[in-house]
Amino acid sequence: MLLSDFKDRHIGATAYIIGKGPSLDIIECLREILNRTNNIVMCINESIHQVEKLKLSVPVYVVQQDSELEKDCIPSN
């Protein structure tokens, strides 16, 4: 998909970007905030695997920035 495919898809939504840093250590504590209506979550690289464990009901996207990771960033869903 291209970035342009997402234009106007989530107007008015709050986007949370989750990377691979220390925030993943407390990701479970963020479940309630991330799962609020009208939010979307964008994961960078392998962070998708920790976010998937939260079983959020909001849209979750993943962007792979590192081509060396190959298929390590593919979501299970």
Image (cartoon, rainbow, N blue to C red):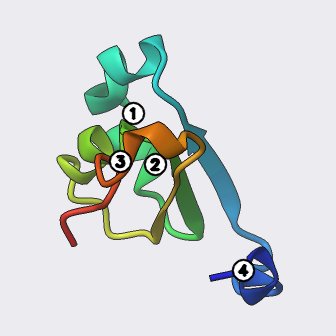
The earlier-in-sequence mark between 3 and 4 is 4
The earlier-in-sequence mark between 2 and 4 is 4
Q: Name the element at disc 2.
A: helix
The residue singled out by tag 1 in the image is 30
Quarter of the image with the N terminus in it: bottom right
Q: Is residue 10 above or below residue 45?
A: below
For the view shown, which residue lies furthest in the front direction?
68
Q: Nearer the viewer, residue 41 or 61?
A: 61
Decide: marks 1, 4 in contact (CB < 8 A)?
Answer: no
The residue singled out by tag 4 in the image is 2
The residue singled out by tag 2 in the image is 34
Q: Position of residue 66 (x, y in %)?
A: 54, 39
Residue occupying the point 79% across, 79% down: 11
The earlier-in-sequence mark between 1 and 4 is 4
C-alpha gap between disc 2 and disc 4 = 24 Å
Q: Position of residue 13 (x, y in %)?
A: 70, 68
C-alpha gap between disc 1 and disc 2 = 6 Å
